[in-house]
C-alpha cells in the first residue's frame, strides 16, 4: 500500500497513493460519522508514529513527510455557530 501526505517546498500538501492507499483513505473517511458528538475524527499515522494507515516513504525527495494527519467531520450546526481558533472549535 502507498499513502503519504507530504509538504512540498511551497508549503502545499501533496497526497500520493496507489489503488490500495486510495481504498484505505476512502474507508477512513467513510468511518467518520456525526453520532452524538458535534465532531468526529480519525487519525492517520505512519509506522514511525505507531500507526499503519500511512506509509513512510517520501515520494518526492524535496518534500517533507507528514507523520500524522487528523481528519475531522464537523456537523453543520457546529460549523454555523462556531469558529475555529488554534485547531479547536469554540462557540462564537
Image (cartoon, grey):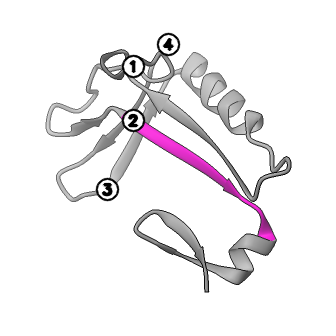
Query: Is 52 left or right of 35, judged from the image as shown?
Result: left
- Looking at marks 3 and 1 on the same chain, the residue that comes earlier in the sequence is marked by 3
Front tag of 1 and 2: 2
Secondary structure type for disc 2: strand
Residue 21 spot, x, y in % from top left: 55, 22
- As measured in the structure, the alpha-carbon distance from the residue carrying label 4 to the one carrying label 3 is 23 Å
- SS for tag 1? loop
Does 75 appear in magenta?
yes
Query: Which dot, 2 or 3, sits closer to the camera?
Result: 2
Q: 46 or 14: nearer the eye?
A: 46
Label 1 sits on residue:
55
* Residue at the (20%, 39%) spot, across then down: 63
Majority secondary structure in the magenta region: strand
Mark number for residue 1?
Answer: 4
The residue under label 2 is 68
Residue 24 part of the magenta-drawn span: no
Amino acid at each position: 500500500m502507498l499513502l503519504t501526505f507530504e509538504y512540498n517546498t511551497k508549503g502545499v500538501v501533496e497526497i500520493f497513493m496507489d489503488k490500495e492507499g486510495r481504498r484505505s483513505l476512502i474507508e477512513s473517511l467513510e468511518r467518520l460519522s456525526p453520532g452524538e458528538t458535534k465532531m468526529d475524527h480519525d487519525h492517520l499515522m505512519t509506522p514511525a508514529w505507531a500507526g499503519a494507515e500511512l506509509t513512510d516513504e517520501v515520494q518526492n525527495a524535496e518534500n517533507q513527510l507528514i507523520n500524522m494527519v487528523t481528519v475531522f467531520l464537523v456537523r453543520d450546526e457546529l460549523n454555523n455557530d462556531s469558529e475555529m481558533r488554534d485547531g479547536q472549535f469554540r462557540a462564537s
